[in-house]
């Protein structure tokens, strides 16, 4: 589901309200939200977390034996529809 109306700050706030430690990073074309996922998490909480990140443009889970589990979500920034959008090859 595209994140047309969802903002990264809203996603981070909602994940924090569910008890996850979050961080937000700005990038040129998107904003990313990461959340540390505890080892013990109930099925109900997983469903709530997935409902939140489903509003992002992309999301996933990075799991390693050294760093635990990190949930990530990406919200694309609005791109202007006119002018120099991404260089000469991307102009409309």
Image (cartoon, grey):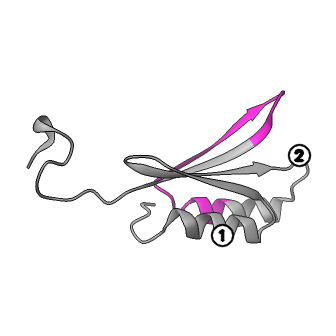
Whole-angstrom CA distance, mark 1 to mark 2, is: 21 Å
Magenta stretch: give its range. Answer: 50-69
When asked about the image quadrant of residue 5, the answer is bottom left
* Front-lying residue, 28 or 47: 28
* Front-lying residue, 50 or 11: 11
Sequence-first tag of 1 and 2: 1
Secondary structure state at the residue bearing disc 2: loop
Q: Which residue is mark 1?
A: 13
**Which of the image's four quarters has the N terminus?**
bottom left
Residue 31 lies within the magenta run = no
* Front-lying residue, 40 or 44: 40
Q: Which residue is mark 2?
A: 39
Secondary structure state at the residue bearing disc 1: helix
Rendered residue at 21%/42% (across/down): 86
When asked about the image quadrant of residue 18, the answer is bottom right
- Residue 36, position as x, y percentages in the image: 76, 49
Does residue 52 lie above or below 71 as drawn?
Answer: below
Rendered residue at 66%/59% (across/down): 50
Rendered residue at 87%/55% (across/down): 41
- Residue 77, position as x, y percentages in the image: 37, 57
């Amino acid at each position: 589901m595209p994140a047309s109306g969802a903002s990264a700050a809203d996603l981070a706030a909602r994940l924090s309200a569910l008890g996850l430690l979050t961080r937000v990073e700005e990038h040129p074309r998107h904003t990313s939200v990461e959340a540390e996922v505890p080892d013990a998490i109930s099925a109900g909480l997983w469903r709530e977390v997935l409902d939140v990140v489903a509003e992002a443009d992309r999301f996933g889970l990075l799991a390693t034996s050294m760093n635990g589990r990190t949930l990530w979500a990406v919200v694309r920034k609005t791109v202007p529809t006119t002018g120099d959008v991404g260089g000469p090859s991307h102009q409309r």
